Structure formats: C-alpha cells, structure tokens
Amino acid sequence: MTVELFIFYVLAAVTVASGVMVISARNPVHSVLFLILAFFNSAGLFVLIGAEFLAMILVVVYVGAVAVLFMFVVMMLDINFLRMQEGFMKYLPVGLLVGIILLAELVLVGGTWAFQGTTEAAAPVAAQPVSNTEALGNLLYTQYFYLFQAAGLILLVAIIGAITLTLRRRPGVRRQDIARQVHRRREETVELRKVRSGSGI
C-alpha cells in the first residue's frame, strides 16, 4: 500500500464519519465542528487528485460559510452565551479531538508531497497546456453555465430565507417606509411660511 492510498483511506473514513456526526449530533456546536472537519477532509481529497484550486475554494468559501451558518443558528435558537461559557470545559475535549485530527491530516498531506519523488503513483504527469483554474473556468462557463447560474439562484434564495427567518420586528422601533416616501405629495412635506423681517427664531 502506497502512502497516497493510505492517506486517501484515512481522509475518506474521517469524511464519512464526520458527515454522520453532523446529522446525528444533538448539539449545534458539535454539528458545526464536525461539518468543518468534513470540509477539511474533502479539501485533502481534492489535494490528493491534484485539484488544489478546488481544495482552496472549499476551505475558504465553505469553512467561512460554516461560521456564518453558526451565527444564524445562534440567532435563531437564541442560545444563552453565559451557559455556553459555563460549559466550555465540557466542549473542550471535542474541540481538541477535532484539532488533533486536522493537525495529523495536515502532516500526512505534507508528507505525501515529501515522498512524491520516491513512489510510482506520484510519477510526474505530462505538462498540461492550461492550469487547473483555467480548465475549471472554461468548463464552468461553457458546458455547465446554466447549472452554475442555477446554483447561484439557489444560494440567493437561501440567503433571502435566512434573512427572513432571523428578521425580528420590535415594537417602538421606527422603520423606513420606502413606498410611503416615494408616493408622498408636495403638500404633505413642504410648508411655506411668511416670516417678517427681524422676527426670526
């Protein structure tokens, strides 16, 4: 068994286990941590097949989106921050476990690059005329253009839904009424007064 195959099995197993824990964990904080772990492992799998751009996008975009998702979960569930801080030591082992797994996987992926010259599976491939990023862009904006736009619309609907779910109207707070401002008449907003000279405020 080569080093690349061993790392693939490790990353794939952790990814599947993390995905199961995301939907089975009762605590939303644990679900978010396992989701981040799944994203990192998926990025490691992309690195193994030579898709570095996809791996970087997965880490930057989706792990960043998980932080936003966690914010929305906190806003919607109205979690008490004092109770979360009190249970910090209870969540510490899970956080340390996730951190140790991520660190070990980073070391394994870094070791793969170090052993690349000594294994047959990592033999250099013929030079491509275009880079991975350029090839991906050509494919996305030509063959899969409509699917790409449909994914953007789905994300837009998800953003609007998240804003609608977290929007709370509080009594006593004045809000801007755009329709009333647009349809107002001059007589309702402008008042002319004749002021005699020397009788100002």
Image (cartoon, grey):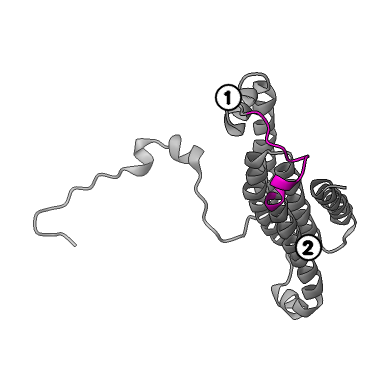
Frontmost of labels 2 and 1 is 1
**Residue 100 magenta-highlighted:** no
Question: Which residue shows up at 81% across the image and 74% down it?
Answer: 93
Percent x, y for residue 165? Answer: 70, 49
**Residue 57 picture location, percent across and down:** 63, 43
Task: Please determine whether, in this image, residue 16 is positioned above or below residue 79.
Answer: above
96 relative to 13 in the view: left or right = left
Residue 197 coordinates in the image, percent (x, y): 9, 54
**Residue 166 appearing in the image:** no
Q: Amino acid at mark 1?
A: Pro
Magenta span: predominant SS is: loop
Q: Which residue is mark 1?
A: 129
Give yes or no for residue 114 being in the magenta stretch: yes
**Range of residues picked out in magenta:** 113-126
**On the image, numbered disc 2 is attached to which residue?**
101
**For residue 88, which quarter of the picture?**
bottom right
**Camera-side residue of 159 and 103:** 103
What amino acid does circle 2 point to? Answer: Ile
